[in-house]
Image: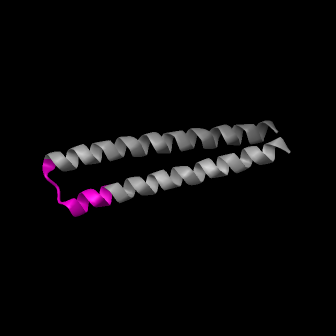
């Protein structure tokens, strides 16, 4: 059981880092893209990359939720 708790904690930290990193990346990409006058296609690419990061974070959170459900039984 303690090993599963450690795995849950590790996955929770990873999800938090992915969310924070993706948010910081998205903000910086938007600011830098606007400052440099990048094309809308390039800025949309950064938006899609951020969307992918947030979807990955949701997958991690779902896995975390499933692990915790199994831990209760």
Identity of the residue furthest to the right in this view = 73
**What kind of secondary structure does the magenta stretch mostly adopt?**
helix
Q: How many marks?
A: 0
Residue 59 x/y as whole percent: 58, 54
> At x 42% / y 42%, what residue is drawn?
21
State the residue at coordinates (55%, 44%): 15
Quadrant where the N terminus lies? Answer: top right
**Residue 14 falls within the magenta-colored stretch:** no
Q: Left or right? Give the position of 16 relative to 24.
A: right
Residue stretch in magenta = 36-46
- Whether residue 2 is situated above or below residue 36 in the rendered picture: above
**Residue furthest bottom as drawn:** 41
Identify the residue shown where x is 69% and y is 42%: 7
Tell me where residue 61 appears, x and y as whole percent: 60, 47
Horizontal and vertical percent for residue 73? 86, 45
Q: Residue at x 13, y 52 (%)?
A: 37
* Color style of the picture: one colour
Q: Is residue 61 left or right of residue 22?
A: right
The residue closer to the viewer here, 34 or 5, is: 34
- Left or right: residue 60 versus residue 30 is right
Which percent across, then down, holds residue 28? 28, 43
């Amino acid at each position: 059981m303690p090993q599963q708790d450690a795995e849950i904690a590790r996955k929770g930290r990873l999800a938090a880092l992915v969310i924070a990193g993706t948010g910081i990346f998205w903000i910086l990409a938007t600011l830098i893209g606007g400052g440099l006058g990048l094309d809308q296609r390039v800025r949309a690419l950064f938006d899609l990359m951020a969307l992918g990061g947030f979807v990955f974070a949701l997958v991690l959170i779902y896995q975390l939720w499933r692990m915790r459900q199994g831990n209760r039984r």
